[in-house]
Amino acid sequence: MEANTIIGLIAGFCTTVAFLPQVIKTWKTKSAKDLSLGMYSIFCTGIVLWLTYGILISDLPIILTNIASLTLASSILYFKLRFKN
């Protein structure tokens, strides 16, 4: 594996894992009142576009990290819509 692929995977891992504490907190507290619906909607759209771009250029770090990011960010978006308080 090339160095640029390794760097991309590590960078993607760090930026993706950053969402994990928010997902856990929102799930445990069942509260998403302080989270922005607009921000997470736009962010998830951006992730889908990055994922599409990664697929089009066959870039593994972009594909893998955006699948993981989309999973976490969309779960926060789901919680925002589900826990309306």
Image (cartoon, helix red, strand yellow):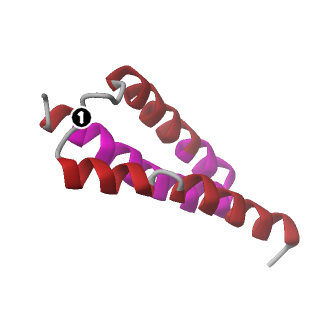
**Farthest right residue in view:** 3
Q: Quadrant of residue 34?
A: top left
Q: Quadrant of the C terminus?
A: top left
The percent position of residue 73, horizontal first and vertical second, equals 40, 45
Residue 77 lies in magenta, yes or no? yes
User: Looking at the picture, how far across and down is residue 56, in whole percent?
Assistant: 62, 47
Q: Is residue 53 magenta?
A: yes
Give the quadrant of residue 3: bottom right
What amino acid is found at the position of numbered circle 1 in the picture?
Lys
The residue beneath circle 1 is 80
Residue 80 lies, with reference to residue 37, above or below; the image says: below
Q: Main secondary structure of the magenta part?
A: helix
Residue at point 30%, 37% (across, down): 77
Image: magenta residue range:
51-79
Q: Quadrant of the N terminus?
A: bottom right
Residue situated furthest front in the rendering: 29
